[in-house]
Amino acid sequence: MPFDIGSVLPRLAEEVKKYSTPVVDLIAVQTRDPYKVLVATILSARTRDEVTAKAAARLFKPAPDLAGLARLSEAELERLIHPVGFFRNKAKHLSQLAGVLAKEFAGRIPDTVEELVKLPGVGRKTANLVVAVAFGKPAICVDTHVHRIMNLWGYVATKTPLETETALRAKLPEAYWQTVNSILVAFGQEICRPRLPHCDRCPIGADCPRIGVTPRRIPGQKRATPAPGGIKKFISWNVNGIRAIEQKGFAGLVNEFDADLIGLQEIKAQPDQLSDGLKNLPGYHSFWYPAARKGYAGVAIYAREQPLRVVEGLGHDTHDGEGRVLTLEYADFYFINAYFPNAQHGLTRLDYKLEFNRDLHRFVDELAAKKSVVLCGDFNVAHREIDLANPKQNEKNPGFCPEERQWMDAFLHSGYLDTFRIFSQEPGQYSWWSYRFNARQKNIGWRIDYFCVDEKSRARVMGAKILAEIMGSDHCPVQLDFL
Ligand code: SF4
């Protein structure tokens, strides 16, 4: 049955009246001031509503209008809006805003998307939101919630927010253009969350096809222990600093992963720098293999089951001083968690990286001769053109240079499988995005995190996916379901 948007959106509009209003709508309701809506919208990108609301309140005291904004220095702006996400960039854009508006638009806030995107720090999403919220004109603001929820409803089948905007312009009745963003942002924050939505208490649960949705585990419900030989769930994630990610709800995420083994890379910490909470996550044994240098590299594994044996490193002094490889042996497989070196700007570490790759390959071959091997981690290479957004521009850059790609070719041809590509040949599937240029929002990314298995174990691979919705690091986790 086709998804009945005309029935669902009005019901959700009623439902979300019970939730807290997204901050940009709130500012519009309170002031109807396009300047404040524009500034609050710029502040709100990649920032929680509570943080945006406080920063906007601090900023609007000395800068209640464009003239006030023009009087503030970039340093004062940084101080006022901190800690919103990317506050330095946003302060820079805000410090340019009054000048650009005066020069290009005679000091008025433009009311079209085409004009608004010419302003510093304003992309299509912000522009659409300002047009809809501040000026009450038809515009569809597609942010991550609208893009995600429209796809899981099957109302559109798109890869990027921009594709979703185009599809909705053609399909969504105009009566919903202005309100769809605020409805789905509120609904997406409260019920249909990116990670494990509350389908159990969703008011439109009966209408929703739940495409690609993993149901939330009900609190208190015991996890079904996989039967011996049952399907096991493995996660690999470059967390880019485990102490930083601990502050972003890491323990809750581990609970929601509900995985049997979790391989982490770039932990950037020694065990004596870790909290008890990290060292003793309920239900897991933890294994740590840090780099000798503090705050650099390092890998770790959380395991539900005690392994038979733990192997630290590759038995090679240089690699092992960098905390790059940690292996757990189980009765019928090895789990190898690896953080491959980065070839670095100018490919200054390419030779070292290729040496590491060769040594790791030899190590994996030795283990694969005995039993199944699962190799996961941040390989720091996008294998083929399909695995990054801008292959042509990166042909000579670290992570996509010919030598790194040739090694990946040779590795796979020698008898290993890139499990994700068993299931998906789709482009636009990435696991790492630069923190710069809004790259994650625009899905300008790279697929450099992998689960590989030896070819003989192909029949044990039951699923592989990229958990792109999980935030907290510049990488997202990847998953393997293994029999
Ligand atoms: S049923 Fe689940 S996936 Fe569907 S809209 Fe509701 S919360 Fe979202």
Image: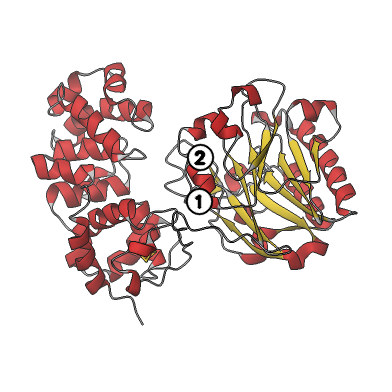
Residue 221 can be seen, yes or no: yes
Question: In the picture shown, does residue 31 fall above or below 375?
Answer: above
Q: What residue type is labelled 1?
A: Glu
Question: In the picture shown, does residue 135 fall above or below 9?
Answer: above
Give the SS element for disc 1: helix
Left or right, 352 with respect to 243, comes to right
Q: How far apart are marks 1 and 2 (CA)?
A: 10 Å
Question: In the picture shown, does residue 419 fall above or below 444?
Answer: below
Q: Residue 163: x and y, percent?
A: 39, 60
Give the SS element for disc 2: helix
Left or right, 376 with respect to 6, comes to right
Q: Does the residue labelled 2 lie within 8 Å of ligand 1?
A: no
- Which corner quadrant holds the N terminus? bottom left
Q: Which of marks 1 and 2 is nearer the N terminus?
A: 2
Which residue is rendered at x = 81% and y = 26% of the image? 318
Q: Residue 269: x and y, percent?
A: 62, 26
